Amino acid sequence: MNEIIDEWIRKADADYATACREMSADENVNFDAVCFHSQQCIEKLMKALLIKNNVTPPKTHDLFQLNLLLTPVCKKWSCRCEDLRYLTRAAVDFRYPGEFADKDEAAEAVEICSKLRTFLHQLLAEN
């Protein structure tokens, strides 16, 4: 794996650690941040997988759009579009006034992130 892919993975894993750490806080949990960092983790891993497959990732936070680019170049890649849309919506909507994530929404974001993260790491580790 090259250095750029490794850096995307390190940054994704840092986002995952932040989401998990915040979710397990004893008080004043920032559920919005949990959702945001869950989405960021998957976005960065998807971009790493695009790079691995010789595709320059676009500057977008839309995981569904990244999915459309990944599907033709990585035959083993598959996921539920609903999961990608959930993470994308959670990351964007909860960053601005008027919308707030609750514990259940944050827990779902981390659950989706964990599942996709494991799968993306497997794909990135393949030769």
Image (tube, helix red, strand yellow):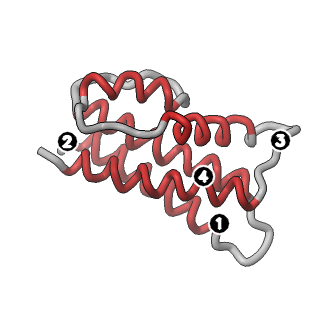
Compared across the picture, whether 27 is left or right of 117 comes to right
The residue where tag 2 is placed is 2
* For marks 1 and 4 on the same chain, the one whose residue lies earlier in the sequence: 1
Secondary structure found at label 2: loop
Q: Quadrant of residue 44?
A: top left
Secondary structure found at label 4: helix
Distance of label 4 from label 2 (alpha carbons): 29 Å
Report the residue that reaches farthest toward the bottom: 26
Compared across the picture, whether 102 is left or right of 48 comes to right
- Which mark, residue 64? none
Distance of label 3 from label 1 (alpha carbons): 18 Å
Q: Residues within 10 Å of mark 4 (few under 14, many from 20)?
A: many
- Which mark, residue 23? 1
| Image coords of residue 10 (percent x, y) | 37, 53
Amino acid type, mark 3: Glu
Distance of label 4 from label 3 (alpha carbons): 15 Å
The residue where tag 4 is placed is 109
Secondary structure found at label 1: helix
Distance of label 1 from label 4 (alpha carbons): 10 Å
* For marks 1 and 2 on the same chain, the one whose residue lies earlier in the sequence: 2
Image quadrant occupied by the N terminus: top left
Check whether the beta carbons of the residues at disc 4 and disc 2 lie within 8 A of each other: no
Q: Nearer the viewer, mark 2 or mark 3?
A: 3
